[in-house]
Image (tube, grey):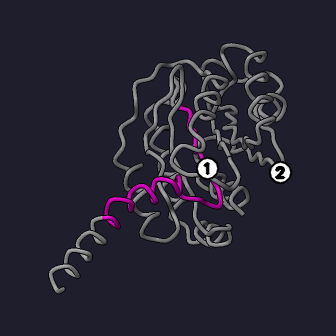
């Protein structure tokens, strides 16, 4: 009798181990309160100094306690976040990361700090960047708002027709596109020049969209940290 009981326990344990992974797989990707893609311009106009200022701005803003405070207000209180660089091409610099506390935010920030600037061209292809971002949602995490946070210092070198088409398609599928245009004014110089109507106007008309979208401009790269902090608090909150 003891042998039989032992065998049953072993078989029961084995059966539990066998179905455990199947049950876990059936549950699907973890649910989060928001899926956020940070998409940063690394085109030719973003020189080494500007790139360093931009990345430092992201790192400092993400380290602010106010960002974690609004993450804690999500339902559920968990943020899925990834960081991509874009120019002519696109590259994921930090993969999807679940952020819900100081420790997990530090993991994301450390990955970003250690990531190398990718050699993906000098052009500014905003439409292609948005298309790339749109394919990243609902892969490793599901649920919550889907937000693309795109920053850049120029207009789309391919014109506005494709850009607006991509923007409108994403918005129609429930994606929110927020913008952070980096406005360069004299005596600062940038090539190619920014749109004559102003980059902030260009972003408002051709880039941002979706319910409750947010756009905050920054005058030059030196004010980037404050602008991205303000935008993170607004878009997550």
Measured in 3D between alpha carbons, the distance from the residue under mark 2 to the one under mark 1, in whole angstroms, is 14 Å
Q: Is residue 35 toward the left or the right of residue 28 in the image?
A: right
Secondary structure beneath label 1: strand
Identify the residue at horizontal 26%, vertical 69% (top origin).
Answer: 11
Which of these two is toward me, 217 or 112? 112
Q: Which residue is mark 1?
A: 36
The dot on residue 212 is 2
Residue 4 in sight from this viewpoint: yes
x 68%, y 59%: residue: 236
- The answer to whether residue 9 is above or below residue 213 is below
Foreground of the two, 60 or 134: 134
Residue 114: give x, y in percent of width and height.
34, 47
Eyeballing the image, is 35 above or below 13? above
The answer to the question of whether label 2 and label 1 lie on touching residues, with beta carbons closer than 8 A, is no
Span of residues in magenta: 15-41
Spot occupied by residue 223 in the image (x, y as percentages of width and height): 62, 50
Where, by quadrant of the figure, is residue 3 drawn? bottom left
Left or right: 168 in relation to 7: right
């Amino acid at each position: 009798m003891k042998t039989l009981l032992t065998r049953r326990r072993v078989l029961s344990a084995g059966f539990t181990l066998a179905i455990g992974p199947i049950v876990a797989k059936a549950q699907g990707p973890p649910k989060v309160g928001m899926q956020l893609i940070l998409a940063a311009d690394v085109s030719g106009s973003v020189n080494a100094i500007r790139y360093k200022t931009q990345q430092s701005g992201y790192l400092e803003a993400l380290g602010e306690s106010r960002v974690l405070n609004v993450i804690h207000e999500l339902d559920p209180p968990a943020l899925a976040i990834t960081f991509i660089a874009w120019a002519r091409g696109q590259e994921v610099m930090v993969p999807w990361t679940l952020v819900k506390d100081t420790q997990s935010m530090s993991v994301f920030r450390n990955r970003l700090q250690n990531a190398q600037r990718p050699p993906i061209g000098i052009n500014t292809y905003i439409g292609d960047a948005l298309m790339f971002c749109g394919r990243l949602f609902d892969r490793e995490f599901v649920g919550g708002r889907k937000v693309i946070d795109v920053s850049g210092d120029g207009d789309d070198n391919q014109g506005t027709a494709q850009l607006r088409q991509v923007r409108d398609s994403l918005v129609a599928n429930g994606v929110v596109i927020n913008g952070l245009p980096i406005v360069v004014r004299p005596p600062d110089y940038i090539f190619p020049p920014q749109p004559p109507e102003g980059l902030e106007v260009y972003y408002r008309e051709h880039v941002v969209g979706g319910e409750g979208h947010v756009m905050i401009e920054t005058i030059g790269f030196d004010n980037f940290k404050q602008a991205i902090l303000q935008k993170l608090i607004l878009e997550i909150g």
